[in-house]
Amino acid sequence: MKHRRTVAVVAISLAICLTFTGCWDGRELNTISLVAGVGVDAAKGKSGITMTVQVGKTGQTNNGKEKESPTSKYLNYQKSGDTELGIIRELTHETSRRLFFGHNQFIIFGKQEAEKGIKPQLDFFLRDQETRLDVWLLTSDTTAGEILNTESDLSPIPAMDLAQLIANQKANSESVETDILDFTSKMESEGTSPVIGLVKIDRTTKKPKFLLSGMAAFKQDKMVGEMSEPETRGYLWTMNKIHSGTVEVKVGNSGSSLEILEGSGKISPKLDKNNHVSVSIKITAKLGIREMTNLENVAFPKAGMLLQTACAETIQKRVQACFQKSQAYGTDIYGIGKMIDEKNPKQWDSMKNNWEQIYKKIKPSITVQVQVSDPGQINQFKK
């Protein structure tokens, strides 16, 4: 008898759970479209924005019957308006399913819109309950709509292809990962400026493909310039964000490729009694030889020293090139001003209104320490 009562209680509990758990209701999935990627561009010939929303096709209609083989695996909805929420509401006239942003992978801003400023367009994604703050941000050297309309051979859905490319970029360390939370926190800071990854379309191949390389530098929420792949690598070295990648160097007629096994970077600003700013950048790297030509007849200790010196010089040049480019743009992408504010708030109060001009005059001291794996010794290159 006791056993029967237990079974009855369990059965009733399961019935209640199934009644109030929407995820078990297959009809709910038939009422939404999962957004995979979002693009925002400046509207052509008028104020406002053009928004592109990409969703994956489910392969089923609302009544659950299978569709015929579609020509593509995704749909792009595009509309112009003054606000993103207004555009999304307007899109309800074009789709019977509600757009669900909880699984959105990224937001791409076209170059023209990024140069105008993206703060107003981030407001919706910061406030809406469905959207996430860890969504990646990207800029394009063309329009965001063109990116989301470009199909590659690697994935039937452009947004998923691009999302996988973003996830894999750590292997090269030539682009940056910036999400909404990171961008907005730096955007609102007086002593630092944000950067976001740059996506391009490579049309040199038979079928276009995405290239995620370099980064866009911002002053507050406005894009002010671009950094190349080597310059972006210099930024990542400085900011201690090197995960992997290779360093390719030439020693005389030889060409060598070394894998980054370990890497670290530290940037330290200091103030003297006259509030003069000095900055030291220290980079350490452990590299493994993966390819070496025309150095076969050179004993390893000597070859290792030659490679260490060449690698240290290459890393130093990239770090310096990025720093100088940021000075030309007048944007403190390293957060040097924020570091000064944290350690010397009184001095920062007297400097912050003129920080851009002060930043442009800084001459950083860059020290690079490289160790080539196997019997190499540490070699230092200091400017």
Image: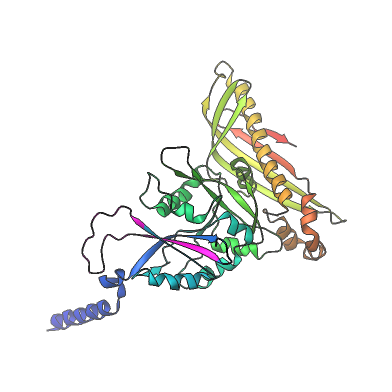
Quarter of the image where one finds residue 297? top right
Q: Which of 297 and 19 is in front in this view?
A: 19
The residue shown at (52%, 73%) is 127
* Residue that lies at the very extreme toward the front in this rendered image: 45
The residue shown at (61%, 34%) is 371
Quarter of the image where one finds residue 54? bottom left
Q: Nearer the viewer, residue 107 or 341?
A: 107
Quadrant the C terminus occupies: top right
Quarter of the image where one finds residue 231? top right
Q: Which of 127 and 348 is in front in this view?
A: 127
Residue 214 spot, x, y in % from top left = 58, 46
Side (left or right) of 243 relative to 70 = right
Side (left or right) of 111 relative to 344 = left
Residue 331 spot, x, y in % from top left = 70, 54
Task: Establish if 158 lies above or below 254.
Answer: below
Q: Can residue 25 be seen in this view?
A: no
The residue shown at (59%, 17%) is 298
Side (left or right) of 137 relative to 35 = right
* Residue that lies at the very extreme toward the right in this rendered image: 274
> How many numbered marks are there?
0
Task: Establish if 22 lies above or below 38.
Answer: below
* Residue that lies at the very extreme toward the left in this rendered image: 1
What is the magenta segment's predominant secondary structure?
loop
Q: Can residue 243 be seen in this view?
A: yes
Residue 97 part of the magenta segment: no
- Per the rendered image, the range of residues in magenta is 49-74
Name the colouring of the figure. rainbow
The residue shown at (58%, 22%) is 254
Side (left or right) of 299 relative to 313 = left
Residue 203 spot, x, y in % from top left = 47, 41
Quadrant the N terminus occupies: bottom left
Residue 110 spot, x, y in % from top left = 55, 56
